[in-house]
Image (tube, grey):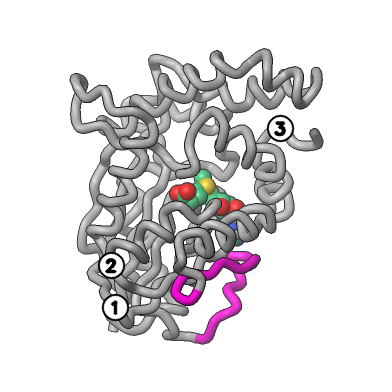
């Protein structure tokens, strides 16, 4: 147990996930992203709500068989495998965390997709791919760990001109002062929705859609808190007393006045 928050460097993020991969899998889902609930009456499970969010993001990527998609910050590969299954596209997923890459490749093999879906360790800030080598890029709740402009520039670089990019990001909500967000579990400073046009323009990405989906994802906090509460004894037993700090780090941004929202950006690389 060496890490309590994701930190700001790729190595720190990887160390963080060495701890959190198993916790997330057990007390959240194999989708390492927010859930998307339709409305206040929607009682979908975390598994359903997170897969629903994946499907929404897949819908932002007009790809089919023969297309090559890069999944930047792929987690343990659940979204990439679903993307490949639903569209017929080939997907390359990259993560800074080796455990995730191994899990992703095991998942692709188990689904009979090893020929079309693969995962490899790489730093999103130095993508090991040629310019213009992908038809589309997905960055599903991963840019929140990275300095955004360099990361977006790398994604834009490896995209073909006109290629599509779809991402989700965590944002400070306009009605908060942002302090809870900055003290939260994503330690890169969070942007606001209104920061996105300038950010994407600087990376030569033209926005086709920018949507604040916080009202749909907000239930994530309560659902996560529920998972942590359900697992606290077991988590402490498994990881020892030091885990208290980790739990606090996870729990910090949770709560009724959640000041961290979520946006979807879909755009294309300027020609
Ligand atoms: C919140 S998880 C999202 C995972 C996945 N997209 C999903 O939706 O299940 C963030 C992901 O970003 C990856 N990540 C963070 N910083 C990275 C970097 N510099 N290079 C590559 N991957 C990175 C993490 O390893 C992790 O896979």
Q: Which of marks 1 and 3 is in front?
A: 1
* Earlier residue among tags 3 and 2: 3
The answer to whether the residues at label 3 and label 2 have Cβ atoms under 8 Å apart is no
Label 3 and label 2: CA atoms lie apart by: 37 Å
Position of residue 240 relative to residue 215, above or below, is: above
The answer to whether the residues at label 1 and label 3 have Cβ atoms under 8 Å apart is no
Q: Is mark 2 on a helix, strand or loop?
A: helix
**Residue 97 horizontal side relative to residue 80, left or right:** right
* Earlier residue among tags 1 and 3: 3
Magenta segment includes 174 = no
Q: Residue at x 80, y 33 (%)?
A: 1
The answer to whether the residues at label 2 and label 1 have Cβ atoms under 8 Å apart is yes
Q: Mark 3 points at which residue?
A: 4
Residue 257 in view (yes/no): yes
How far across and down, in percent of the image, does residue 21 sit?
A: 62, 41
Q: Name the residue under label 2.
A: 87
Magenta-drawn segment: 115-130
* Earlier residue among tags 2 and 1: 1
Q: Which residue is drawn at 65% across and 66% down?
A: 121
Q: Is mark 1 on a helix, strand or loop?
A: loop
**Where the C terminus falls, by quadrant?**
bottom left
Label 2 and label 1: CA atoms lie apart by: 7 Å
Q: Name the residue under label 1.
A: 65
Question: Which residue occupies the foreground of this view, 99 or 252?
Answer: 99
Q: Callout 2: 10 Å neighbours few (<14), some, many (20+)?
A: some
Magenta segment includes 126 = yes
Label 1 and label 3: CA atoms lie apart by: 41 Å
Residue 143 in view (yes/no): no
Q: Nearer the viewer, mark 3 or mark 2?
A: 2
């Amino acid at each position: 147990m060496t890490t309590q928050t994701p930190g700001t460097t790729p190595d720190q993020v990887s160390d963080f996930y060495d701890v959190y991969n198993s916790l997330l899998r057990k007390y959240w889902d194999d989708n390492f992203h927010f859930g998307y609930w339709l409305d206040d009456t929607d009682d979908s499970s975390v598994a359903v709500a997170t897969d629903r969010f994946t499907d929404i993001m897949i819908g932002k990527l007009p790809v089919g068989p023969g297309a090559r998609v890069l999944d930047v910050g792929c987690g343990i590969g659940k979204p990439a495998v679903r993307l490949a299954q639903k569209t017929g596209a080939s997907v390359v997923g990259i993560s800074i965390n080796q455990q995730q890459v191994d899990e992703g490749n095991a998942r692709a093999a188990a689904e009979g997709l090893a020929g079309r879906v693969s995962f490899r360790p790489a730093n999103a800030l130095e993508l090991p791919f040629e310019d213009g080598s992908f038809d589309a890029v997905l960055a599903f709740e991963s840019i929140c760990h990275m300095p955004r402009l360099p990361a977006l520039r790398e994604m834009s670089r490896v995209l073909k001109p006109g290629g599509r990019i779809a991402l989700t990001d965590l944002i400070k909500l306009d009605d908060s002062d942002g302090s809870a967000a900055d003290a939260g579990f994503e330690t890169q400073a969070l942007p606001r929705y209104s920061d996105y046009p300038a950010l994407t323009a600087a990376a030569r990405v033209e926005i086709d859609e920018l949507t604040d989906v916080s009202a749909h994802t907000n239930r994530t906090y309560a659902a996560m808190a529920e998972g942590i509460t359900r697992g606290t004894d077991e988590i402490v037993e498994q990881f020892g007393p030091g885990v208290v700090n980790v739990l606090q780090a996870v729990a910090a941004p949770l709560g009724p006045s959640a000041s961290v929202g979520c946006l979807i950006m879909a755009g294309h690389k300027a020609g």
